[in-house]
Amino acid sequence: MRDRGLIWSGLALFLAFLTLPVWHNLSAHVTAKGPEPVLPKTQKQCVAPVEFMKSSHMSLLLDWRDSALREGSRDYTTADGRHYQISLTSTCLTECHGAKADFCDRCHTYAAVSPPCWDCHLDRSPR
Amino acid sequence: MKISRQTFLQMGLRMSGVAALAAAAKRVVAAVSKTRWAMAVDTAACARQPNCTKCIAACHQAHNVPTIPDPRHEIRWIAKVTFDQAFRGQEDEYSPLRAAPAMVLCNHCDDPACVRVCPTQATFKREDGIVAMDFHRCIGCRYCMAACPYGSRSFNWSDPRPYIHNPIPEFPTRTKGVVEKCSFCSERLGAGRPPACVESCPEKALVFGNVADPGSPIRQLLGARRHIRRKPEAGTGPEVYYIV
């Protein structure tokens, strides 16, 4: 039993190494909270149900793109009969979501995705 | 049920007959309700103000076109050039058109060479004759620039945003590696407004309209006045007319 000190310190080192992610998260203030996009104040209903928008807004935006550019139709009718002008900046941002930094970027940063929309389309706030 | 070879062939013939009829009906409908956007430039009216650049300013403002000082990287949707640059091959030495610079833009050709060569169909021809671009699809190969007989296209060699001084948020900018050109203001036409250059011209020298409609002002103008087009011999059918 002369190696008792060596064994205990080895065990302690091993445990510290094993729990390293926990300590790292604690020190970096990582929480289990999801992204918190700023929701529109005036509008209650998006162009489609919230669940659909959460999962498939990218497909909807691609359909909008094809409709506006290829078919020349810039009017979108929702399932419940409301009409919207097809425009990322003039409709999505201006009518409801305000600045992209408060809405789009919150989830995109959280999910570590960088869609190229904003390479061309302009945010409302001047750069 | 057993199908004999004869009935099978007859069925095939009938089906192709129906398809041909449907295609013919579609063509008839398209011919009846046809729109063909075109522009006429009253060169005498334009020449009254040889230093005016209001159409260029209005277009470039409306579409977030960058102002790049380096002429090799310049982006132009609409420009004023000399007679020799605009009407190459027209050797009329004493033409009245020589008096002032000519206003040039995309000719929105009937048979556009740029559309033919585009490998991604980023440039395409709409039903109403506008040669439109889907910037999302442009891969920057510049085939269209080589194909266009008029030099109507520009390429973004660098990020254009630093050169756009007052961007309007309603219209997107472009990115590095994308070709761009005049769109006949398809986004404004969709909202029932005339193109930005037409609206801004102080001399009303630009006449925009539907040449498929014999009663339209542009058709009456073209019917009454002599006019030329740029490089008609290229066979692309340019739709910008210069009234002499």
Image (tube, rainbow, N blue to C red):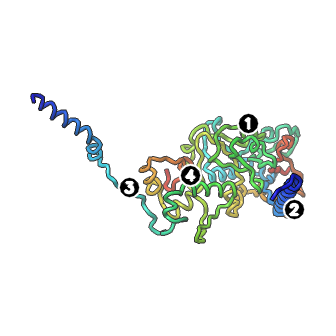
Residue B146 is labelled as 1
Mark 2 neighbour density, 10 Å: few (under 14) some (14–19) many (20 or more): few
Calculate the distance from the C-alpha at mark 1 to the C-alpha at mark 4. Answer: 28 Å
- At horizontal 47% and vertical 47% (from top left) the residue drawn is A113
Residue A121 is labelled as 4
Q: In the image shown, does B74 or A23 lie closer to the viewer?
A: A23
Q: Position of residue A123 (x, y in %)?
A: 51, 54
Report how many numbered discs are placed on residues in the image.
4
* Element on which disc 4 rests: loop
Q: Chain of mark 2?
A: B
Instruction: Tell if the residue under mark 3 belongs to the same chain as the one under mark 4.
Output: yes
Marks 4 and 2 close (CB-CB < 8 Å):
no
Mark 4 neighbour density, 10 Å: few (under 14) some (14–19) many (20 or more): some
Q: Which residue is mark 2?
A: B214
Marks 1 and 3 close (CB-CB < 8 Å):
no
Calculate the distance from the C-alpha at mark 1 to the C-alpha at mark 3. Answer: 50 Å
Marks 1 and 4 close (CB-CB < 8 Å):
no
- At horizontal 63% and vertical 51% (from top left) the residue drawn is B63
Q: Which quadrant would the N terminus of chain A be assigned to in this image?
A: top left
Q: Chain of mark 3?
A: A
Instruction: Please tell me in which quadrant of the rendered image residue A106 appears.
Output: bottom left
Instruction: Tell if the residue under mark 1 belongs to the same chain as the one under mark 2.
Output: yes
Q: Position of residue B80 (x, y in %)?
A: 73, 45
| Horizontal arrangement in the rendering, residue B175 relative to residue B97 (left or right) | left
Calculate the distance from the C-alpha at mark 1 to the C-alpha at mark 2. Answer: 35 Å
Amino acid at circle 2: Pro
Calculate the distance from the C-alpha at mark 4 to the C-alpha at mark 2. Answer: 39 Å
Q: Which residue is mark 3?
A: A34
Which label sits in the foreground, 1 or 3? 3
Q: Earlier in the sequence, mark 1 or mark 2?
A: 1
* Element on which disc 1 rests: helix
